[in-house]
C-alpha cells in the first residue's frame, strides 16, 4: 500500500514558505543603492610616464610638474593631503598626474627611486620621499661642494648610486618599498628607459608648457598662472 503524500507536501510547503520569507523585502523597505566608486586608490600611468591618481577619464585633469628637491613641492604634498584625495579625487571628477621636472643629479636620483617598483605603489614612495626631504637635503648640504664633487663626475649610473649611498636613500626607499634590495635599487637607477621618461617630461615642461617654477599645475592642459600651492589651487578645483 502506498503511503499518502499529503503530509509530505504539507511539510514541503511550510519549508518553502519559511525559505521565501528570508528573502522577502518588507513593505516600504527600499533597496540600498550601490556605493559610489572611490577613486582615491586608483593609480595608472600616462603615455609620457607620469603617474595618475584617480579616474583616468576624469573631467578635471590636473597635472603637477614637480621636483623632489623643491621645498615648495614637499609643502604642497603636505598641505593638500588628504583634502585633495578625499574631497576631489575620490569622487572620480578630478585626477592628479605627477610629472617630473629635474633640476640636478640629486633630483634625478630621487625621481628614479620614486619610480622604483610597481606603478600602483608609486604614490606611497612619492609621499614618503617628500616627507623625508628635509632629512636627506640636510645631509646633502652638509657634504659641501667637495663632498658633492663625485656627483658630477664619471658615468651617470655610478654618480646616481653614489648620491643614493651618500644620503642614505637606499634605506629610505626600503621604508616605503620593504622588499627592495640594493641590487634592485641599483637596477632602477641604471634604467635608461626610466631616465629617458624623466628627462622627456622635464623638456616638455620647460619647452612646451613653459613652466616658471615648481610645483606648477595645468588643468585640462592649460597652465595655471601664479598657482604654486594648495591654497591657490583648491579654489580653482572647487569652482569647476
Image (cartoon, rainbow, N blue to C red):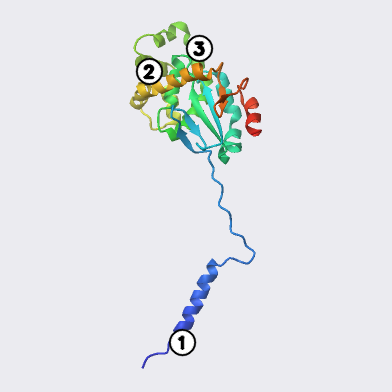
Task: Report the residue marked by disc 3.
Answer: 141
Q: Nearer the viewer, residue 93 or 122?
A: 93
| Residue 60 place in picture, x, y as percent | 57, 34
Q: Secondary structure at mark 1?
A: helix
Crowding around mark 2 (Cα neighbors within 10 Å: few <14, some 14 to 19, many 20+) is many
How many marks do you count on the picture? 3
9 up-or-down from 87: above or below:
below
Q: Are marks 2 and 1 in contact (CB under 8 Å)?
A: no
Q: Give the mark nearer the N terminus: 2 vs 1.
A: 1
Crowding around mark 1 (Cα neighbors within 10 Å: few <14, some 14 to 19, many 20+) is few
Task: Report the residue marked by disc 2.
Answer: 161
Report how far apart the C-alphas of labels 2 and 3 lie in the structure.
18 Å
Report how far apart the C-alphas of labels 3 and 1 lie in the structure.
93 Å
| Residue 149 place in picture, x, y as percent | 42, 7
| Residue 214 place in picture, x, y as percent | 55, 19
* Residue pictured at 42% horizontal, 27% vertical: 115
* Residue pictured at 43% horizontal, 87% vertical: 5
Question: From where the camera sits, is residue 220 visible?
Answer: yes
> Residue lying furthest bottom in this view?
1
Amino acid at each position: 500500500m502506498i503511503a499518502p503524500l499529503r503530509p509530505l507536501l504539507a511539510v514541503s510547503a511550510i519549508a518553502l514558505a519559511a525559505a521565501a520569507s528570508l528573502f522577502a523585502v518588507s513593505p516600504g523597505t527600499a533597496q540600498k543603492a550601490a556605493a559610489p566608486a572611490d577613486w582615491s586608490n586608483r593609480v595608472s600611468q600616462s603615455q609620457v610616464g607620469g603617474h595618475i591618481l584617480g579616474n583616468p577619464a576624469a573631467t578635471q585633469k590636473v597635472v603637477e610638474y614637480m621636483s623632489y628637491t623643491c621645498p615648495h613641492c614637499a609643502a604642497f604634498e603636505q598641505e593638500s593631503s588628504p583634502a585633495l584625495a578625499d574631497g576631489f579625487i575620490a569622487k572620480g571628477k578630478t585626477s592628479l598626474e605627477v610629472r617630473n621636472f629635474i633640476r640636478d643629479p640629486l633630483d634625478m636620483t630621487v625621481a628614479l627611486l620614486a619610480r622604483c617598483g610597481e606603478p600602483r605603489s608609486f604614490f606611497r614612495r612619492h609621499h614618503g620621499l617628500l616627507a623625508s626631504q628635509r632629512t636627506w637635503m640636510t645631509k646633502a648640504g652638509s657634504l659641501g661642494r667637495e663632498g658633492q664633487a663625485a656627483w658630477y663626475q664619471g658615468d651617470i649610473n655610478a654618480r646616481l648610486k653614489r648620491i643614493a649611498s651618500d644620503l642614505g636613500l637606499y634605506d629610505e626607499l626600503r621604508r616605503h618599498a620593504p622588499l627592495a634590495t640594493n641590487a634592485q635599487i641599483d637596477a632602477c637607477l641604471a634604467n635608461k628607459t626610466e631616465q629617458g621618461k624623466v628627462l622627456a617630461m622635464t623638456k616638455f615642461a620647460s619647452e612646451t608648457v613653459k613652466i616658471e617654477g615648481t610645483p606648477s599645475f595645468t588643468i585640462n592642459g592649460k597652465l595655471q598662472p601664479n598657482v604654486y600651492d594648495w591654497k591657490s589651487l583648491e579654489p580653482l578645483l572647487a569652482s569647476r
